[in-house]
Amino acid sequence: MSSTDGRGRSIVQDIVMPGENIITITRGGLLYRDAAGITQWIDFRACRDQHLATLSSPSRLDRRYVGCRNTEQSATVYVRFFSTPPVIFAFKNAARRNLDLIQPLSRMGWYTTICVRSTEALPGTD
Protein backbone atom coordinates (compact mmCIF):
# COMPACT_ATOMS: atom_id res chain seq x y z
CA MET A 1 0.00 0.00 0.00
CA SER A 2 1.17 3.50 -0.67
CA SER A 3 -0.19 6.99 -0.87
CA THR A 4 1.38 10.38 -1.44
CA ASP A 5 2.19 13.24 0.87
CA GLY A 6 1.37 16.89 0.14
CA ARG A 7 4.43 17.15 -2.16
CA GLY A 8 3.54 14.13 -4.30
CA ARG A 9 6.13 11.84 -2.69
CA SER A 10 5.15 8.22 -2.21
CA ILE A 11 4.48 7.07 1.36
CA VAL A 12 4.77 3.33 1.93
CA GLN A 13 2.46 2.04 4.64
CA ASP A 14 3.20 -0.95 6.84
CA ILE A 15 1.20 -4.13 6.33
CA VAL A 16 0.15 -5.54 9.72
CA MET A 17 -0.61 -9.26 9.93
CA PRO A 18 -1.27 -11.61 12.85
CA GLY A 19 1.60 -13.98 13.59
CA GLU A 20 -0.72 -16.91 12.90
CA ASN A 21 -0.51 -16.02 9.18
CA ILE A 22 3.09 -17.24 8.97
CA ILE A 23 3.22 -20.46 6.97
CA THR A 24 6.92 -21.35 7.07
CA ILE A 25 10.36 -19.85 7.61
CA THR A 26 13.33 -20.96 5.50
CA ARG A 27 16.93 -19.82 5.14
CA GLY A 28 15.84 -17.68 2.19
CA GLY A 29 12.70 -16.08 3.58
CA LEU A 30 9.25 -16.36 5.03
CA LEU A 31 5.96 -17.48 3.48
CA TYR A 32 2.76 -16.00 4.88
CA ARG A 33 -0.91 -15.66 4.03
CA ASP A 34 -2.05 -12.06 3.49
CA ALA A 35 -5.45 -10.61 4.43
CA ALA A 36 -6.92 -11.84 1.11
CA GLY A 37 -5.66 -15.38 1.74
CA ILE A 38 -2.94 -15.09 -0.92
CA THR A 39 0.46 -16.63 -0.14
CA GLN A 40 3.21 -13.97 -0.04
CA TRP A 41 7.01 -14.18 0.28
CA ILE A 42 9.44 -12.03 2.28
CA ASP A 43 12.99 -12.37 0.94
CA PHE A 44 15.50 -12.12 3.80
CA ARG A 45 18.38 -11.01 1.56
CA ALA A 46 16.25 -8.15 0.22
CA CYS A 47 15.37 -7.20 3.83
CA ARG A 48 19.04 -7.24 4.79
CA ASP A 49 19.99 -5.11 1.77
CA GLN A 50 17.22 -2.61 2.59
CA HIS A 51 18.56 -2.34 6.15
CA LEU A 52 22.20 -2.00 5.07
CA ALA A 53 21.26 0.83 2.69
CA THR A 54 20.22 2.91 5.71
CA LEU A 55 23.59 2.56 7.50
CA SER A 56 26.75 4.56 6.84
CA SER A 57 29.16 1.91 8.19
CA PRO A 58 27.43 -1.40 8.90
CA SER A 59 28.97 -3.86 11.34
CA ARG A 60 29.35 -7.56 10.69
CA LEU A 61 26.20 -8.27 12.74
CA ASP A 62 24.22 -5.63 10.79
CA ARG A 63 24.58 -7.93 7.78
CA ARG A 64 22.34 -10.50 9.52
CA TYR A 65 19.43 -8.21 10.46
CA VAL A 66 16.19 -8.67 8.48
CA GLY A 67 13.82 -6.77 10.75
CA CYS A 68 13.24 -5.18 14.11
CA ARG A 69 11.12 -6.08 17.11
CA ASN A 70 9.52 -4.03 19.82
CA THR A 71 10.00 -4.49 23.55
CA GLU A 72 7.96 -6.78 25.74
CA GLN A 73 6.57 -3.74 27.59
CA SER A 74 4.26 -2.97 24.67
CA ALA A 75 0.60 -4.05 24.60
CA THR A 76 1.15 -5.89 21.31
CA VAL A 77 4.53 -7.42 20.53
CA TYR A 78 5.64 -7.58 16.92
CA VAL A 79 8.39 -8.02 14.36
CA ARG A 80 8.67 -5.52 11.50
CA PHE A 81 10.56 -6.80 8.47
CA PHE A 82 12.72 -4.45 6.41
CA SER A 83 10.76 -5.44 3.31
CA THR A 84 9.10 -3.23 0.72
CA PRO A 85 6.42 -2.61 1.75
CA PRO A 86 7.27 -3.23 5.41
CA VAL A 87 5.40 -6.25 6.82
CA ILE A 88 4.68 -6.48 10.55
CA PHE A 89 3.66 -9.67 12.32
CA ALA A 90 1.85 -9.02 15.60
CA PHE A 91 1.69 -11.51 18.47
CA LYS A 92 -0.34 -11.75 21.69
CA ASN A 93 2.78 -12.04 23.83
CA ALA A 94 6.58 -12.14 23.65
CA ALA A 95 6.76 -15.88 24.37
CA ARG A 96 4.63 -16.66 21.29
CA ARG A 97 6.64 -14.21 19.14
CA ASN A 98 9.93 -15.72 20.27
CA LEU A 99 8.78 -19.31 19.74
CA ASP A 100 7.04 -18.76 16.37
CA LEU A 101 9.40 -16.23 14.76
CA ILE A 102 12.52 -15.09 16.64
CA GLN A 103 13.87 -18.59 17.36
CA PRO A 104 13.24 -19.98 13.85
CA LEU A 105 14.88 -16.86 12.37
CA SER A 106 18.00 -17.28 14.49
CA ARG A 107 18.23 -20.99 13.59
CA MET A 108 18.40 -19.85 9.96
CA GLY A 109 21.14 -17.31 10.74
CA TRP A 110 18.96 -14.16 10.65
CA TYR A 111 18.23 -11.71 13.47
CA THR A 112 16.08 -8.76 14.49
CA THR A 113 17.19 -5.61 16.22
CA ILE A 114 15.14 -3.39 18.56
CA CYS A 115 12.89 -0.97 16.65
CA VAL A 116 13.62 2.72 17.15
CA ARG A 117 10.12 3.42 18.47
CA SER A 118 9.77 0.05 20.16
CA THR A 119 7.07 0.96 22.67
CA GLU A 120 4.58 2.48 20.23
CA ALA A 121 1.30 0.68 19.60
CA LEU A 122 0.61 -0.75 16.18
CA PRO A 123 -1.99 0.99 14.00
CA GLY A 124 -5.44 -0.37 14.81
CA THR A 125 -4.39 -2.19 17.99
CA ASP A 126 -5.10 0.53 20.56
Image (cartoon, helix red, strand yellow):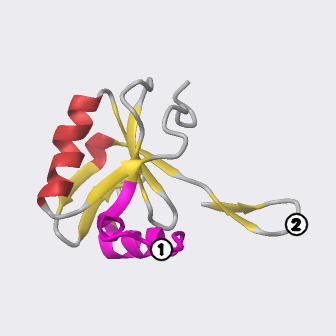
Q: Amino acid at mark 1?
A: Ser
Q: Amino acid at mark 2?
A: Arg
What x and y, as percent, mark residue 16? 47, 46
In front here: 112 or 93?
112
- Asked whether, in this view, residue 40 is left or right of residue 29, the answer is right
Which range of residues does the magenta coloring cover? 42-67
Circle on res. 57: 1
At x 50% / y 68%, what residue is drawn? Answer: 84
Circle on res. 7: 2
At x 16% / y 65%, what residue is drawn? Answer: 26
What x and y, as percent, mark residue 50? 47, 72
Pointer 2 local density, CA inside 10 Å: few below 14, some 14–19, many at least 20: few
Measure the C-alpha gap from mark 1 to mark 2: 31 Å
Pointer 1 local density, CA inside 10 Å: few below 14, some 14–19, many at least 20: few
Secondary element type, mark 2: loop
Number of numbered discs on residues? 2
In the rendered view, tell whether residue 59 sits above or below residue 37: below
What x and y, as percent, mark residue 120? 55, 33
In the rendered view, tell whether residue 14 sits above or below residue 53: above
Query: Was residue 120 drawn as part of the magenta stretch in this picture?
Result: no
Q: Earlier in the sequence, mark 1 or mark 2?
A: 2
The residue furthest right is 6
Circle on res. 30: none
